[in-house]
Image (cartoon, helix red, strand yellow):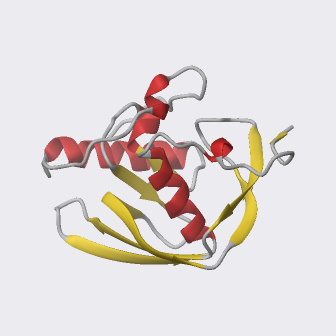
Amino acid sequence: MAIRDVKLYKKDEVLRMKSKPVDKFDNRLETLISDMIETMYKENGVGLAAPQVGVLKRVVVIDTGEGIHVLVNPEIVSQEGEQTDYEGCLSIPGYRGKVTRPAQVVVKAQDKEGKSIEIKGEGLLARALCHEIDHLDGILYIDKVIPGTLEELD
């Protein structure tokens, strides 16, 4: 396992590119996932998408405090309700802003072996799922921030 460099907004174009589906579930994927988990924890994040470490593959890792979720080729299949709260991003350090997201989501994906899985998230987990899946399509939270709520952190 290795810590990877987190790509930064306005510096790394990869953050604005669309990721390709994973079709090979091999040792390279396993290494990517392990590195992403290690990098996310080192950076004190709750989620990390492969483009944030420079890899245009549809892979995200999330831990909102209830254990790690590894999602390959994730897709939101249903959403309900609405929640508005502050978000930050490892690729946009030093800032946060309010974003409205679904209150509940259901995501279909594959695990690191390629088996189909489904995850239901609400609250922070729903927010993290939406945030990380957006990364796979080149969308950053600042694209959805409520005007006037983006603020610089001390």
Count up the numbered dots.
0
Q: Which residue is depicted at the point 67% across and 42% down?
A: 142
Q: Which residue is depicted at the point 41% across and 50% down?
A: 37
* Rendered position, 7 above or below 127: above
> Could you tell me which quadrant the C terminus lies in?
top right
The x and y percentages for residue 84 are 74, 66
**12 or 99, which lies in front?**
99
Q: Which residue is depicted at the point 75% across and 63% down?
A: 85
**Would residue 75 be found to the left or right of residue 80 on screen?**
left
The x and y percentages for residue 81 are 63, 79
Q: Quadrant of residue 106?
A: bottom left
The x and y percentages for residue 61 are 42, 55
The x and y percentages for residue 147 are 81, 46
Q: Which residue is depicted at the point 60% across and 23% down?
A: 10
**11 or 90, which lies in front?**
11
* Rendered position, 36 above or below 112: above
Q: Quadrant of residue 110?
A: bottom left
Residue, far top: 11
> Could you tell me which quadrant the N terminus lies in?
top left
**Would residue 1 be found to the left or right of residue 102 on screen?**
left
* Rendered position, 88 above or below 72: above
**Would residue 146 be found to the left or right of residue 131 on screen?**
right
